[in-house]
Image: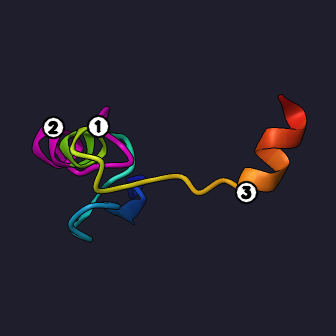
Amino acid sequence: MKKNKKIKCINCNKEFDIMLDTKPFCSKRCSYIDLNNWLDEKYSIQINEENYEKDM
């Protein structure tokens, strides 16, 4: 019998089967929480403004 690998959800740290369609999240709920965090601008991607202005 083949064992399925377990990984941890990037949102709640719960272990889940790597074969789930929701990876890297353990559930749809965790994926929606993460999406909501992006939409509420709780996450951000930092840029170096000096380099950004040079590229323009």
The answer to whether marks 3 and 2 mark residues whose Cβ atoms lie closer than 8 Å is: no
Q: What amino acid does circle 1 point to?
A: Thr
Kindly state the secondary structure of the residue where label 3 is placed: loop
Lower sequence index among marks 1 and 3: 1
CA gap, disc 1 to disc 2? 6 Å
Residue in the image at 16% along x and 48% along y? 33
Percent position of residue 30, x then y? 17, 49
Would you place residue 7 above or below residue 51 in this image? below
Residue in the image at 26% along x and 71% along y? 13
Which residue is disc 3 drawn over? 48
Percent position of residue 54, x then y? 89, 40
Depth check: give the residue in front, 48 or 13: 48
Residue segment shown in magenta: 21-33
Which residue is disc 1 drawn over? 22
Label ID, residue 28: 2
Of discs 3 and 2, which sits in the foreground?
3
The answer to whether marks 1 and 2 mark residues whose Cβ atoms lie closer than 8 Å is: yes
